[in-house]
Image (spheres, grey):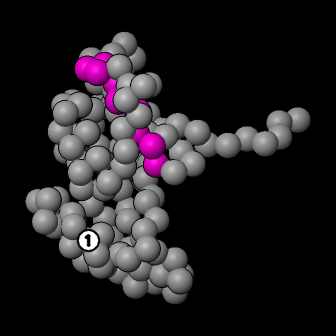
Amino acid sequence: MLTNITLSNINLFVKDINSAKLFYTKALCLVENTKLSAVPSFILLNADACKITLQDSSAPGAATGKADSVELGFEVEDVEAARKRLLEWGVEVTEIQQMGWGGEFYATDPDGHRPTIFRRL
């Protein structure tokens, strides 16, 4: 039986690692772990308890393209402020949707992934 399983890393294959890094570090404020990154092959980003690896799509076995079956969810304290920041960075975003559990909007990264930015009530 498996116990104490923690989601530790999500790997995103990207066409342009520098554009992806700019999106996730500047627009979404994730922090690069420079000790574990191996530029230009991959960049490891700290996203609280989970890590995101941006890996060059030329890596063996890599697949690129929009992934509608996976959604990266980023919880923030202020959804409106986060949306405004992304708009200032020129990121394509949707309107904020208010739900019974909180509010959310979607953004589009340079590779077509659509992270959701949300705040729970």
The single residue placed furthest to the front in the displayed view is 35
Left or right of 88, for residue 86: right
Identity, as a three-letter code, of the amino acid under mark 1: Arg
The single residue placed furthest to the top in the displayed view is 60
Residue 92, image x, y percentages? 17, 61
Q: For the point 83% across and 36% down, which residue is it?
A: 2
Residue 16 drawn above or below residue 81: above
For mark 1, give the secondary structure: helix
Look at the image and tell me in which quarter the N terminus lies: top right
Residue 63 visible in image:
no
Task: Please name whichever residue, 68 or 41, is drawn nearer the observer in this view of the structure.
Answer: 41
Q: For the point 30% across and 79% down, which residue is it?
A: 80
Residue 107 visible in image:
yes
Say how many tags the image has: 1
Residue 46, magenta (yes or no) = yes
Q: For the point 42% across and 25% down, which residue is it?
A: 35
Residue 8 drawn above or below residue 60: below
Span colored in magenta: 39-47
Residue 67, image x, y percentages? 35, 44
Residue 75, image x, y percentages? 46, 65
Residue 62, magenta (yes or no) = no
Question: Which residue is disc 1 drawn over?
Answer: 83
- The rendered magenta stretch, by its main secondary structure, is classed as strand
Task: Please name whichever residue, 93 or 36, is drawn nearer the observer in this view of the structure.
Answer: 36
Task: Please name whichever residue, 31 or 13, is drawn nearer the observer in this view of the structure.
Answer: 31
Residue 39, image x, y percentages? 29, 21
Task: Report crowding for label 1: few under 14, some 14 to 19, many 20 or more residues within 10 A (C-alpha).
Answer: many
Residue 75 drawn above or below residue 63: below
Left or right of 1, for residue 27: left
Q: Quadrant of residue 3?
A: top right
Residue 78 drawn above or below residue 25: below
Q: For the point 49% across and 40% down, which residue is it?
A: 51
